[in-house]
Amino acid sequence: MDLLFWSIIFSYLNFLSIKFTPKLISLFLYYYNGEQKIKSEILLLEKEQSKISIVKEFAKHAKLQRKINMLIKQMEYNFQKNVSRNMKIKMTCTLILYFFSVVSNYIFISKYRYEIVLDQLPSEWFSPFSWLISWPLSKVGTMSFFFWFCCTNYVAQATVNGIQF
């Protein structure tokens, strides 16, 4: 029973890490690059500009508009400069996660491939496919870890892909 629980946890952790780690890295890079600071400064200047009458204080309004335009150009330049670097970082992290996922799945399956997860299953439930459910074991009426782990991986992948972030 312990193996049932750990295989489910392991499957979900694999797919959750693969799905959400690149998004967390994007969020981190967004704050790390200083885009948030520039955006908040632009919003502050626009709020200040909206309080000023363009007719009465044109010079002050134009000065604020030039500052806003300069910050927008700076933000666009930073964005263009960081796009390829951010993509490389995200792709590298994703590839590393996929590599660790494949290696850990291989180790997990090779360690427990001859374990019986469920024993004494009625053979008439899965009559044409009972050999597949018990593979690589030769015992009929059992469920092998390999089959169980494939099922939990499929369910974990389907549920994690259904989560919107």
Image (tube, rainbow, N blue to C red):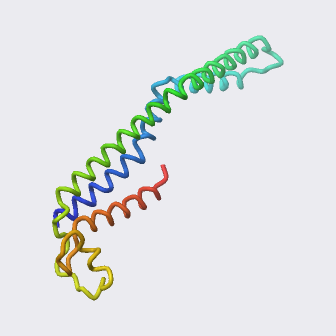
At 69% from the left edge and 19% from the top edge, which residue is drawn? 69
- Dividing the picture into quadrants, the one containing residue 71 is top right
Q: Left or right of 25: which side holds 108?
A: left
Q: Where is residue 81 in the image (x, y as percent from the top left)?
A: 56, 22
At 16% from the left edge and 66% from the top edge, which residue is drawn? 115
Q: Position of residue 6 (x, y in %)?
A: 22, 58
At 39% from the left edge and 46% from the top edge, which residue is drawn? 18
- Count numbered badges in the picture: 0
Compare residues 110 and 12 and report the one nearer the observer: 110
- Dividing the picture into quadrants, the one containing residue 99 is top left
- Dividing the picture into quadrants, the one containing residue 79 is top right
Q: Left or right of 163: which side holds 100?
A: left
Location of the N terminus by quadrant is: bottom left
Q: Is residue 157 above or below residue 65?
A: below
Q: Where is residue 152 in the image (x, y as percent from the top left)?
A: 32, 63
Compare residues 146 and 77 and report the one nearer the observer: 146
Q: In this view, does 146 lie above or below 133?
A: above
Residue found farthest to the bottom: 124
At 17% from the left edge and 77% from the top edge, which residue is drawn? 139
Residue found farthest to the right: 55
Compare residues 29 and 111 and report the one nearer the observer: 111
Q: In this view, does 116 lie above or below 23?
A: below
Q: Left or right of 127: which side holds 111?
A: left
Q: Is residue 84 above or below residue 146?
A: above
